[in-house]
Image (cartoon, helix red, strand yellow):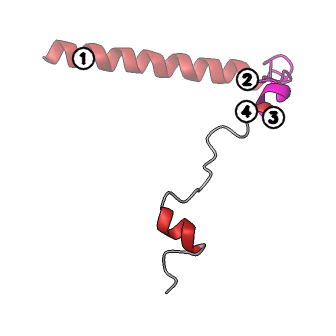
Amino acid sequence: MQKKKHDQERIRDSLKDLHIEIQKRNKSKTPKELGMHEKFEDVPTKLSDRDKDYGKVNKVSTSTIQHMRGGSTFEE
């Protein structure tokens, strides 16, 4: 159990060191060098506009009595 915990700590520490090293390296780079100037679109606008109505709920009464009276369920 102790060996496994020690291995996990060692891996975590090495990942922290790598992360700090990458941060230091990227600090002096421009956004273009880091690839931040590129725009990523998951779905083209044409398709996303077509899919806007999916998931919308149309509330339609299922009560025939309410429908025949033409009012809400709280009217007397």
Q: Quick one: label 2 or label 3, which is nearer the N terminus? A: 2
Looking at the rendered image, the disc whose residue lies closer to the viewer, 2 or 3, is: 3
Outermost residue to the bottom: 76
Q: What residue type is labelled 1?
A: His
Q: Where is residue 4 in the image (x, y as percent from the top left)?
A: 20, 14
Mark pair 2, 1: CA separation: 41 Å
Density class for disc 1 (Cα within 10 Å; few <14, some 14-19, many ≥20) is few
Q: What's the magenta bit mostly, secondary-structure-wise?
A: loop
Determine the residue positioned at 41% across, 20% down: 13
Image marks 1 and 3: residues in contact by CB distance under 8 Å: no
Determine the residue positioned at 54% across, 16% down: 18
* Residue named by callout 4: 51
The residue lying at 49 percent from left, 75 percent from top is: 73
Above or below for 71 versus 11: below
Q: Mark 3 points at which residue?
A: 49
| Disc 3, SS | helix
Left or right: residue 2 versus residue 51 is: left
| Image coordinates for residue 71, horizontal then vertical, percent | 58, 75
Alpha carbon of mark 4 to alpha carbon of mark 3: how far?
5 Å
Q: Name the residue under label 2.
A: 42
Q: Mark 2 falls on what kind of element?
A: loop
* Mark 4 or mark 2, earlier in chain: 2
